[in-house]
Amino acid sequence: MAASLDFQKGLYTTARRIRAFDDRIRRGLSTGEFRFNYWPVEGQEAISAGVCAALEPDDQMIITYRGAADAIAKGVPLEAFAAEIMGKVTAPSGGKGGAMGVSYPDAGVVAATGIVGAGAPIATGLGLASQLKTDSRVTVVSFGDGATSIGAVHEAMNLAALWNLPIIFLCHNNLFGEGTPQAEYTRTKRLSDRAAAYGMEGVTVDGTDAQAVYEAAKSAVERARSGKGPTFLEAIAFRLNGHYFGDPCGYVDADALAEARANEPIGKLRSQLSSSGMSDADLDALDTQIDEEVEAAIGAARDAEMPAPDALATQVYAGDAGPIAPAERQTTTAPKGGSKDLSMAEAINQALGQALESDERVILLGEDIADPVGGLLTCTAGLSTRFGTDRVRATPIAEQAIVGAATGAALAGLRPVAELMFFDFLGVCLDQLANHAAKFRYMSGGRSSVPLTLRTMEGYFAGAQHSQSLEAWLTHTPGLKVVCPSTPADAKGLLTACIDDDDPCVFVENMSLLLARTQRGPVPEAAYSIPLGQADVKRTGSDVTVVSWGAMVHPALEAADKLAEDGVSVEVVDLRTLVPLDLETIEASVNKTKRLVIAHSACGFGGFGAEIAALVGEHCFGTLAKPIKRVAAPFTPVPRADSLAYVHLPNARSIKAAVEELVG
């Protein structure tokens, strides 16, 4: 059926607005009028115009750093978008996002990513949230053809198909993965053919034909909205400029480029309007109106101020918190009712069950977490039976998809608790956690919140790839909170606090504590929360302070018991959370004892203990009677042989020896 004149005019207006914006930005960059990174979209305007014409205003998009066409087509105001890519204070993010951090939820643009392919797992989380809320929203995740070589895209498509999520995977195929021709990075002729492997619909369309794109997108939207699952939509359109502004394009064949310019989408749309009866004078008037609109928007953004320096450290965490906990301690009320001796695994299970029961926004995601497995060490046993597999979801073995889906679900207002089976697997999904979950609040100028909790486990005597303590990777990432409980009671209260927190929290469990039969302890049966950023003095003393966290707290207490027999009084401070760090409690203890030992299971070189030592050195320099000592693992991978592992892992003997050196 032929499209109406008004509909054709709408497509043309959107595509022409994108072209005018792109042209004006490139002219300004060429003349030095402004300076920033920019990725041109000329030649691909019809893709975004056609797809967005098929969407409702509250449908959602995850876009990329090459996001001008998608953002404009979806309804982001021109001045807001221009200010964003220029880093101006008038931008929605206040100058902190840039082209790689565009977000405008009022128009359905939830987030952008500067990491190729990384938006796909996040989109699955948005789709999952829509499915659970039954809000009929459709999510489009946009990416270039080069992203189809990224593992995150494959993990996301598999998850979306498995769960029948309302998502459109939109591939802007310009036939080059950055500067490499498609034939040189894949044997796949039609990228959409890959969809069949995941059990989803795959469609390829001429990306220079806005009407054809619209029809394909409309079918995909209807499929998603009616519960029939995702679609891979490949739109092929030669991009008429290089990968980035200033790209010399030596890899592009001149004849192919000339052919593409002759077939570019704006001219095709204009010809269609002329054929449908719109006069050249009316078209020229529309072009003039668009050009003036673009000029005014870019001029206003150009002339706006840059953000003030004092904005630098704001909006990293909710409430403008930082890595050091505030001096004012939150008061906590002991829960009413009785207690029961629980293992750490049982305490975690109880915390998760109470969170699921009290807050419908809480969902669990992870490998093998549903019954009958109930998690590797039974931390989630029984929960899928109680709350259903919609809310307690066993996932494929796909860590990028798990953490990305949790990030997207959190952006959509849920409070997901994702499980990363072993700490060592952090390297597989660190992009989703450190580049996305941790940074969305800051990049959005505080408008986006990612209240996810990532549970993970340190192995124990399990070799080099299943036993690492990697907390220093996380504490070096602004935006993340890091929690390391040592007792069942702390585990329950701290996990509850993480789930309630508005920032992404990594909750590190230790296999030795989860398995230990002797580490049971009294845990209040009622729900309760232990504020993050409040250390616990597990043992008071006057001669030496030992600061530790997680499983290493117990050897510290054992060493303190043995030292007490020799008349040495040791104070053991259990940090419980590394970020935010309770520096006040550390300082108070060190100022009393004048000696400090820091004990942790991670490698000493570059470990988090070095940060504590540096802070204490700055804050307590005049108080210290002896140099600070660290007890930590040597700078080697974790060995498998028990004879080597016992040497690698610090213990009560090594902590005792360090204390004796300080008091000797």
Image: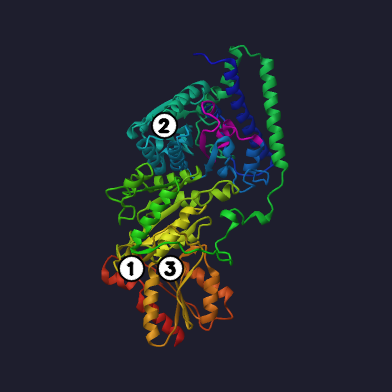
Q: Is residue 633 visible?
A: no
Position of residue 549 measured from the top left corner of the image (x, y, whole percent): 43, 68
Image coordinates for residue 264, horizontal then vertical, percent: 55, 24
Q: Earlier in the sequence, mark 3 or mark 2?
A: 2
Which of the marked residues, 2 or 1, is nearer the chain's N terminus? 2
252 or 514: nearer the viewer: 514
The answer for how far apart the CA atoms under marks 3 and 2 are is: 46 Å
Pair 3/1: label in front = 1
Write down the region rendered in magenta: 52-78
Taking 352 as reference, is 572 above or below it?
below
Q: Is residue 66 above or below residue 481?
A: above
Kindly identify which residue carries mark 3. Answer: 549
Mark 2 vs mark 1: in front: 1
Q: Is residue 70 magenta?
A: yes
First along the sequence among labels 3 and 1: 1
Q: Nearer the viewer, residue 601 or 60?
A: 60
Disc 3 vs disc 2: Cβ atoms closer than 8 Å?
A: no
SS state under label 3: loop
Question: Going by the picture, which residue comes out furthest to the right?
Answer: 303
Q: Residues within 10 Å of mark 3 (few under 14, many from 20)?
A: many
Q: In the rendered view, would you say 227 is above or below 310?
A: above
Residue 207 in view in this figure: yes
Counting the numbered discs, the total is 3
Q: Looking at the picture, tell me which residue is in the foreground, 293 or 516.
A: 516
Q: Which residue is mark 2?
A: 232
User: Where residue 519 is drawn, which disc sits there?
Assistant: 1
Query: Residue 243's x, y, as percent?
Result: 53, 38
Q: What kind of element bears circle 2?
A: strand
Q: Which colour style is shown?
A: rainbow
In the figure, is residue 62 to the left or right of 319?
left
Residue at left offset 45%, top offset 67%:
607
